[in-house]
Amino acid sequence: MPERFKPTFKDLDKDAERHLDLFGTKGSLMGAAVVYGLDESERHVFDAYVAAGANDAIATWLMRRWNYLYGTNPYFDETIDRFCREGAAARVSRLWRHVCAEQIENYRILKAHRDLKDMNKSIAQAKERVLTSMREWRRCLVRLSDEDALLRLDEEIADFEADRRKPVGRKPDPRKIDQHLFWEIVRPGDQVLVSNSGRVSHHPERRPGDCPPALLVDEITGRLAEFSGNQIRVFDKLLWEAMQRLNHYDVWALAFLLQDSCSDDAFEAFRAWVILQGREASDLALGEPVTFLSRIDVGGNMDGSSLLHAPAIAFDRRTGKALPMAKRPPAQVQGTPWREDLVEKTYPLLASKIAARKDRL
């Protein structure tokens, strides 16, 4: 790697972008300026991370890049193979558990909406993707001779194949879900905010990145499934209201500046991610965004869209039926619209604070 470039070994994507800026080939595409060579820069930086032993940063990067539809990528496969050769069983299982959690979530979302037209084929395909990943994970454990983990995984595979989940046969929680209980379900014992890399206050032993959003939402779904179907519908209504409170141009500007862009869909995912951070975070994001910044990790994938499916999955688990579609008015963004090319001038303090945080990454 050229001597002029020194990776931070904190964020592989950002280091690859810096490398591209320095050594990429500048050109144009349809009249717009572009820089070619991202694949080469990514490879250079990835190899540097491997050489430096920056395994936690590599794992975090791979989990951010994972796509439950398209499967693993060469970097994932290389890393799994290297961890197997090094005997790093815990690291192997951490990555594969993330993959399976994302795919299982997709399967459960589809199954919760199985009353929709032509869903059976999609459900079957989603289930087969999960089983394929679990079998690959199993092959790794055989290679690592991790007998205890192998026994646990075999049980999980058998349960998933038979569509067995933790039964919710006991009587539902008798409490009525109000605003207070809504936030308690989202973040029990809320004392600090969850970072975008996955830090969880009620599981202090977890390190950043150890808990991907799919696992966080799975915990929420499990808590929610303890309630009756009617109360799950109340939670769904309160979740919609929480999303609407954040549906404001000021919050959209925050998302835009944090992520360098933000489409309609990305803004919905960002608002759900903010809700995952807890009640205080939701209030700060709208009322005191600069204070909100001081309570989160800047960088990474701020996508909490999986939270929006939690009520449907919990309702299916509790009742065995699909969650009825609620009739709601069209969502309207509140506040004053802004232009993308002027957003930094429209929110100068917020823009400068975010830029300073990014520079420290």
Image: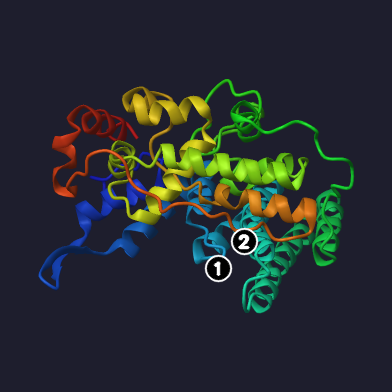
The residue mark sitting in front, 2 or 1, is: 2
For label 1, the residue is 69
Mark 2 and mark 1 lie on one chain; the one further toward the N terminus is: 1
Amino acid type, callout 2:
Asn
Q: How is the image coloured?
A: rainbow
181 relative to 285 in the view: left or right = right
Q: Is residue 196 visible?
A: no
The residue closer to the viewer here, 135 or 233, is: 233
Amino acid type, callout 1:
Leu
Q: Residue at x 22, y 33 (%)?
A: 351
Looking at the rendered structure, the secondary structure element under dot 2 is: helix
Q: Residue 141 bears which disc, if any?
A: none
Looking at the rendered structure, the secondary structure element under dot 1 is: loop
201 relative to 283 in the view: left or right = right
Q: Residue at x 13, y 36 (%)?
A: 345
Q: Residue at x 61, y 49 (%)?
A: 214
Does 338 sit above or below residue 202?
below
For label 2, the residue is 106
Does 306 sit above or below residue 77?
above
